Image (cartoon, rainbow, N blue to C red):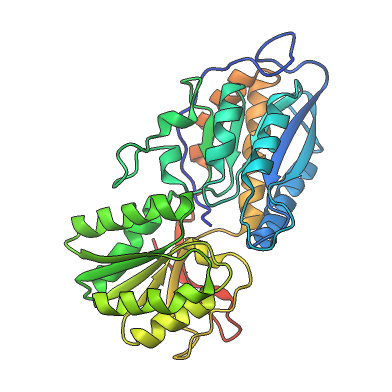
Amino acid sequence: MAFATSALAVSGCLGSGGSDEPGRVKGDTATVYSSAPRHGPSAELARAVMAGERRALTQAGGRAGGLRIRLRQLPATDDQPDNPWDPALVSENANSAANDPTTIAYLGELDYGATAVSLPITNNAGLLQVSPGDGLTSLTQRPPGRPRAGPERYYPSDKHTFVRLGPTDLEEAEYLVERAQASGAKRIAVVFSGDIYGRELTPQIFARARRAGLEPVASEEYRGQLDEIPDIASRLGDAHPDVVIHAAVAGVGTGRLLAEIDARLPTVPLLATSGILAGRTSLVLPTGPGRIEAVGPGISPRRAGYDAMRLVLDAVDEGQRDRGRVIAAARRLAPRIADPGLARYRPGADGRFRRVGVAR
């Protein structure tokens, strides 16, 4: 999960479901929808993000642009403990916002590619969408290694309505390749998840590795099945990488998977993207708690939620009830938010990751 600052240029507006005046909120109340996990690996982070959203709204007295601002926080997960987000619920949340004539903005999604589901819906409705931390690269640029995965598929209106308050996954990939290169690595391997997060991130890591002169020697998909872990570790060992990068959301078996890789490749550095920071998975490895290093947000989740809501409120102060003007204001104001960059994380003796320094 990542929290820094970059913004995609946004402009224009379309109608939103049911309003007599397309592109404008009627009445004296506007609604900000927020979509975030209530269960699963990101639930703890999501609670902090939502608390930050509420704090920003409270500090503003619940008002902006002459309107009373109502916050509706909706669940982006079912009660399954291993799902970082649920596509059906994310779609439902976005449609609820799109079909509400009082909606002025949508906060979401939190992480790991969920915005790929909601953004086409809110974009088609002409709504501002602000993500506190979804780093999916293709939301704002064509990711290296995936030439057909450009951002145009997320913008059916052909107008950009999305602002990201966080670095892209590509920035994480670039940093990890730099770390691998600094360690003297020449051969690189990746363990990834089969969801949109892992599928998009792995080609980016390999593309940047090739550009840096590193040779990709193995890519192994972990599908959450414990019985496949020994074979994954064995194949990685046979590939003889100089560094292994974990590019997946922490979940069932993550600790065991890394322990098996550690046992098979005890002298090979283990690096990880921010997906490993999710949840409470124990990652204590036999050779010690500091065996793996991850890159992730340089800002707290609570501050990320606060900044996202604050940006919306400031944009509404300028654009008032006009959705198109709110989008344009958010585009202009977003770069003013301080950029805290990326940070380095390592697990302690309890297996929980803690920030240990600045990445970039």
Residue 354 in which image quadrant = bottom right
Taking depth in this image into account, of 225 and 196 the one nearest to the observer is: 225
Using the image, determine if residue 236 lies above or below residue 219.
below
Give the answer, above or below, for where 76 lies relative to 264.
Answer: above
Query: Where is residue 10 drawn, in percent x and y?
Result: 49, 26
Q: Residue furthest top?
A: 20
Residue 241 visible in the picture: no
Does 121 sit left or right of 266 as displayed? right
How many labels, in total?
A: 0
Q: Quadrant of residue 184?
A: bottom left
Measuring 55% from the left and 41% from the top, which residue is drawn there?
Answer: 115
Give coordinates of residue 278: x percent, y percent.
58, 64
Q: Position of residue 157 (x, y in %)?
A: 51, 20
Residue nearer the viewer, 119 or 106: 119
Q: Position of residue 152 (x, y in %)?
A: 41, 29
Q: In percent of the image, x 26 and y 53: which residue is there?
A: 207
Q: Which residue is rendered at x = 51% and y = 30% of the image? A: 331
The residue drawn where x is 46% and y is 20% is 158
The quadrant the C terminus occupies is bottom left
